[in-house]
Amino acid sequence: MPARAGIRNGDVVRVFNARGQVLAGAVVSDRYAPGVARIHEGAWYDPDKGGEPGALCKYGNPNVLTIDIGTSQLAQATSAHTTLVEIEKYNGQLEQVTAFNGPVEMVAQCEYVPASQVKS
């Protein structure tokens, strides 16, 4: 599949289904069966359109591709360890990853105060 789709190691790809879409870096390997894709979890959600439905996650959070049903009332981890997706080479403009910046509203209103100066 990757060769037919023109996907090579290091390419940025769009992984998508009816639930959502993410960008990911391609690593083409013969370690997996044809038609199998793997995305490691752990990426922070970073939508390109402020969380609008269908927004493209620029940082590759696979949770947007899976069913939103927790594994249990305790864990609340994603229950689907597999999901159907399509993959295509991404040719769009790559936007800056902003997942670690924090909400703009909060950053603008917050001021760092050293703990020694906090009044109790």
Image (cartoon, rainbow, N blue to C red):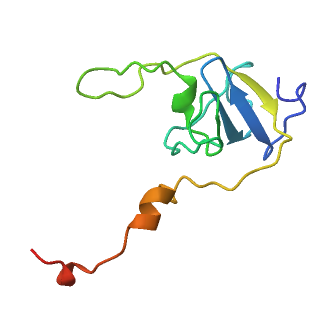
Seen from this angle, which residue lies furthest bottom?
116
Seen from this angle, which residue lies furthest left?
120
Which quadrant would the N terminus be assigned to in this image? Answer: top right
Residue visible at 35% across and 22% down in the picture:
70
- Considering depth in this image, is 81 or 47 the residue closer to the camera? 47
| x, y percent for residue 17 | 67, 20
Give residue 48's quadrant in the image.
top right
Can residue 90 be seen in this snapshot?
yes
| x, y percent for residue 72 | 28, 20
Which quadrant would the C terminus be assigned to in this image? Answer: bottom left
- Considering depth in this image, is 69 or 109 the residue closer to the camera? 109
Q: Is residue 72 above or below residue 120?
A: above
Q: Is residue 58 above or below residue 82?
A: below
Q: Is residue 47 left or right of residue 77?
A: right
Q: Is residue 2 left or right of residue 69?
A: right
Number of numbered discs overlaid on the protein picture: 0
Q: Is residue 40 above or below residue 65?
A: below
| x, y percent for residue 36 | 68, 21
Can residue 28 be seen in this snapshot?
no
Residue visible at 69% across and 25% down in the picture:
16
Residue visible at 51% across and 58% down in the picture:
104
Give residue 27's quadrant in the image.
top right
Q: Is residue 20 above or below residue 111?
A: above
| x, y percent for residue 89 | 83, 35
